[in-house]
């Protein structure tokens, strides 16, 4: 269960992963339930914050949405996207498909 949404997120239930355009190596996320149903986003940089255990920093942008005015500046969409990202990361770590790299020290 997420901190923001009242329903637990699950792949192919509340969201689905959609391949990017031909030749791209990124995946898009389409929300299938909830307040942003049929909105498609793309996550950008994702960073785990070790000083603040359990926190994630990320950015994203809206690829498409039934709401033409919806942007990544919408706080509710930010919270919803963060909850879905947490589930994607949790599932990826559980099934071994996640690739986590430490940021090089300068």
Image (spheres, grey):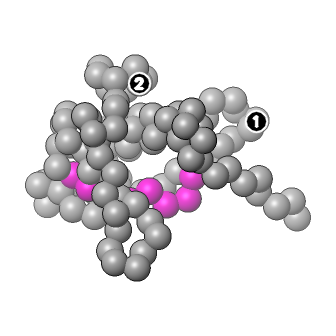
Residue drawn at x 25%, y 34% as measured from the top left: 13
Q: Earlier in the sequence, mark 2 or mark 1?
A: 2
Quadrant of the rendering where the N terminus is positioned: top left
Quadrant of the rendering where the C terminus is positioned: bottom right
Taking the image as drawn, is residue 102 in sight? yes
Relative to 42, 6 lies left or right: left
Residue drawn at x 64%, y 52% as measured from the top left: 99
Query: Which residue of the protein is positioned furthest toward the bottom in this rendering?
Result: 23
Q: Nearer the viewer, residue 26 or 69?
A: 26
Q: Nearer the viewer, residue 49 or 26?
A: 26
Dot 1, how many residues are within 10 Å of its Cα: few (below 14), some (14-19), or many (20+)?
Answer: few
Residue drawn at x 74%, y 38% as measured from the top left: 50
| Disc 2 + disc 1, Cβ < 8 Å | no
Relative to 71, 51 lies left or right: right
Residue drawn at x 29%, y 46% as measured from the top left: 16
Residue 60 x %, y %: 42, 57
Whether residue 54 is in magenta: the answer is no
Query: Which residue of the protein is positioned furthest toward the right in this rendering?
Result: 106
Would you place residue 46 above or below residue 19 in this image? above
Taking the image as drawn, is residue 69 in sight? no
Query: Which residue of the protein is positioned furthest toward the front in this rendering?
Result: 95
Give the extent of the magenta segment.
Answer: 39-46
Dot 2, how many residues are within 10 Å of its Cα: few (below 14), some (14-19), or many (20+)?
Answer: some
Q: Which residue is mark 1?
A: 51
Whether residue 44 is in magenta: the answer is yes
Q: Which residue is mark 2?
A: 2
Identify the main secondary structure in magenta: strand
* Marks 2/1: CA–CA distance: 21 Å
Would you place residue 34 above or below residue 36 in this image? above
Residue 56 x %, y %: 58, 41
In the picture, residue 43 is in which quadrant? bottom left
């Amino acid at each position: 269960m997420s901190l923001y949404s009242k329903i637990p997120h699950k792949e192919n239930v509340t969201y689905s992963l959609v391949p990017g355009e031909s030749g791209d190596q990124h995946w898009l996320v389409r929300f299938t339930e909830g307040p942003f149903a049929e909105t498609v986003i793309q996550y950008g940089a994702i960073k785990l914050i070790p000083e603040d255990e359990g926190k994630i920093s990320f950015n994203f942008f809206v690829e498409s949405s039934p709401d033409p005015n919806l942007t990544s500046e919408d706080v509710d969409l930010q919270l919803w996207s963060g909850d879905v990202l947490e589930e994607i990361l949790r599932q990826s770590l559980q099934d071994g498909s996640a690739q986590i790299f430490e940021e090089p020290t300068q």
